[in-house]
Amino acid sequence: MSDTASKPRPEYRNIGIPQILSYRLPLAAKTSILHRISGALLFLSLPVVLLPLLAASLGSEAGFNQIGAYVGHPLFKLVLLVLIWGYLHHFCAGIRYLALDLGKGIDKYSACKTAASVIIVSLALTVVFGLKLFGAW
């Protein structure tokens, strides 16, 4: 005979912001999210920051000197440092994703190691470029 008792229906509740913030994502997921953020940052900064700077610097010698004066300001250097990090992270993560597309490093251990290496290498390169940008050498 079959059991005719009704099973309790699952109860779905709204998820709040504190619950979402308590999720623990794997390092590969964090790297993927940062890859998307860095790509959006680079894409959105292109018409707002990068192309006007390029146009002004290539327009005349006075424009080039004016851009040099802007780059000397510490706040502008911070903006450039964020763009440098965005480019370096996007580049390193892109190489990782190309390797994943080729079937290299798909297992869980390798994926975690390559995700960690992307973050470490991009931050280390950003520090090197940041030291150069701020005049450490």
Image (cartoon, helix red, strand yellow):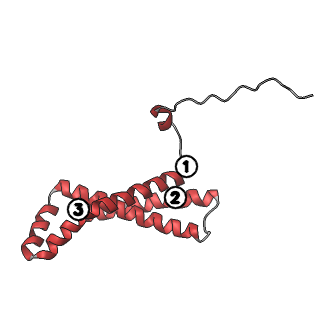
Which residue bears the numbered disc 3? 49
Q: Position of residue 123 (x, y in %)?
A: 39, 58
> Amino acid under label 3?
Val
Label 3: few (<14), some (14–19) or many (≥20) C-alpha neighbours in 10 Å: some
**In which image quadrant can residue 85 be found?**
bottom left
Q: Position of residue 54 (x, y in %)?
A: 20, 71
Rounded to the nearest angstrom, the CA distance separating label 1 from label 3 is: 33 Å
User: Where's the N terminus, which quadrant?
Assistant: top right
Tell me, yes or no, if residue 55 can be seen here.
yes
119 or 100: which is nearer to us?
100
Which residue bears the numbered disc 1? 26
Rounded to the nearest angstrom, the CA distance separating label 2 from label 3 is: 29 Å
Which residue bears the numbered disc 2? 115
Q: How many marks?
A: 3
First of labels 2, 1 by sequence position: 1
> Amino acid under label 1?
Pro
